[in-house]
Image (tube, rainbow, N blue to C red):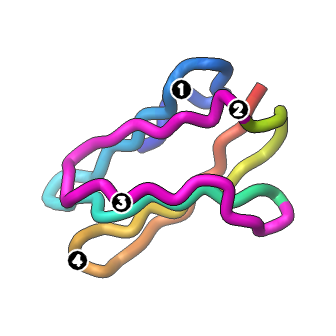
Amino acid sequence: MIYPNPVGEELVRVQAPEGRRIAEVTVYSALGQVVVNQATGDRKRTAINLAGLPAGQYWVRTRYASGRAAVSGVVRK
């Protein structure tokens, strides 16, 4: 789960589904460029800062400790 969405100056919260732990979060621009890459140290939830990025659509790839991954969209307003 990623919230809030859309996001302004506040931190974006990323929460793993039940039974999963987050190993890494990577944020990509709409052009596919990595703009944030954050190792989390095997957590249930984490926060990322998008405040310095321009407004637009971004993709958040969450890699879990199990090796699985999920991708979600987030809008920076």
The amino acid at mark 2 is Gly
Q: Earlier in the sequence, mark 2 or mark 1?
A: 1
Name the secondary structure under disc 4. Answer: loop
Front-most of residues 16 and 10:
10
Give the Cα separation between the discs numbered 2 and 1.
16 Å
- Residue 71 placed where, x, y %? 55, 63
Looking at the image, is 61 positioned above or below residue 73? below
Looking at the image, is 37 positioned above or below residue 48? below
Q: What residue span does the magenta drawing correspond to? A: 31-52
* In this rendering, position of residue 14 left or right of residue 16: right
The amino acid at mark 4 is Ser
**Label 2 sits on residue:** 52
The amino acid at mark 3 is Ala
Give the Cα separation between the discs numbered 1 and 3.
21 Å
| Residue drawn where x is 14% and y is 59% of the image | 19
**Label 3 sits on residue:** 39
Front-most of residues 13 and 51:
51
- Residue 54 placed where, x, y %? 82, 35
The amino acid at mark 1 is Pro
- Where on the picture, by quarter, is residue 21? bottom left
Looking at the image, is 73 positioned above or below residue 23? above
Choose mark 4 or mark 2, whichever is in front.
Answer: 2
Q: Answer whether residue 63 is visible to the viewer in this image.
A: yes
Q: Answer whether residue 60 is visible to the viewer in this image.
A: no
**Label 1 sits on residue:** 4
Choose mark 4 or mark 3, whichever is in front.
Answer: 3
